[in-house]
Amino acid sequence: MTVRTGAVALVLAGLVVAGGTVVSAQVPDPPDPGGGVTVGASSSTSGHDDLPDVRVRWNRGSGPAQMNKGLPNPPGWYRAAVGPRRPEKVLYLTFDDGPSRHTAALLRHLGRYRAKVTFFVTGAAASSRPRLVDRIHRQGHALGNHTWGHPRLTRISTAAVSSELRRTRIVVGPDMGDCMRPPYGLVNRRVAKASIAAGFQPVLWTAHIEDWVPHSGSWTIGQLRRGTRPGAVILMHDTHATTVAAVSKMLPRWRAQGYRLAPVPVCS
């Protein structure tokens, strides 16, 4: 089912939630993100109480705070955020948790290759570095909502979810796009409804470089190469120097391979 609120649409086909909590399942290789089946369409202006239960499947990984480092892949999210899968050589690089002291260097590298990306900023970080937020927008990148304080949204109240998104939008202002990324990829029916009601399309990812755990530059580059394919949405964090260095080395390679780097469509 597709639920629309203004320009925001979240496909909620097939997502595992039981009693409002996420049920994780081992998924060795998630299906094509564009392969979710959309059945019918619905439009609601009264709090989206008609939304069905949704199911979320992802890989469970290890790491700090039992980080789920797999690929959260509710069928249909890709089509809602990006559109149908196409063979066009375009990459959607996304950077979470900033802006940080490493963001300026990343912007310089991106500018050198005229690459455009999406930054999912937290309100706390944006409020401490407003000039960097303005610079991100001026360079033609998209700004998405990554909440104020990076909580596990499935563990806080609906009012708190809305507050996290609203406070961040106020700090960033009108330059913020109509998209959000749930911290840790944690999303369920309740969080999805709250996000849509606030005007933000949840955006997940098709690949990541696991940069919340220290890795060498060569390992990080290897992850980026493995995640590169037409239409990939790659999760990274502009809070790590190793990530910025790896991206700087991949930018000329992506250009040589004929890739175009663009913001996630729903965010721009």
Image: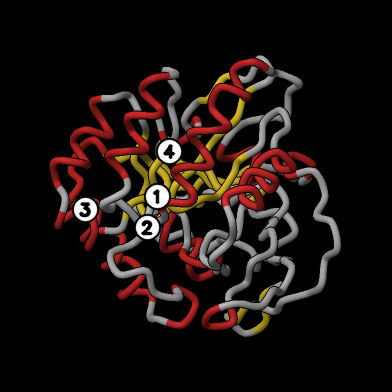
Q: What residue is shown at x 55% (from left), y 68% (from top)?
A: 213
Residue 41 % position (x, y)? 63, 42
Q: Is residue 224 left or right of residue 134?
A: right
The answer to whether the residue labelled 2 contacts the one labelled 1, judged by CB atoms less than 8 Å apart, is yes
Residue 184 % position (x, y)? 52, 67
Q: Is residue 71 left or right of residue 187?
A: right
**Which residue was labeled with disc 1?**
238
Query: Judging from the image, what secondary structure is the residue with disc 1 in?
Result: loop
Tell me how the rendering is colored: secondary structure
Which residue, as the protein is rendered here, is positioned at the far right? 28
Give 99 or 19, whichever is nearer the viewer. 99
Q: Is residue 237 left or right of residue 225?
A: left
Amino acid type assigned to the residue bearing label 3 in the image: Ala
Query: Judging from the image, what secondary structure is the residue with disc 4 in?
Result: strand
The answer to whether the residue labelled 1 contacts the one labelled 4, judged by CB atoms less than 8 Å apart, is no
Q: Earlier in the sequence, mark 3 or mark 4?
A: 4
User: Would you place residue 29 above or below residue 143 in this image?
Assistant: below
Mark 1–mark 4 distance (CA, rounded to whole Å)? 11 Å
Q: Earlier in the sequence, mark 3 or mark 1?
A: 3
**Which residue was labeled with disc 4?**
118
Q: What residue is shown at x 64% (from left), y 48% (from top)?
A: 218
User: Would you place residue 73 above or below residue 39 in this image?
Assistant: below
Point out the frontmost of discs 2 and 1: 1
Query: Judging from the image, what secondary structure is the residue with disc 3 in?
Result: helix
Point out the frontmost of discs 3 and 1: 1
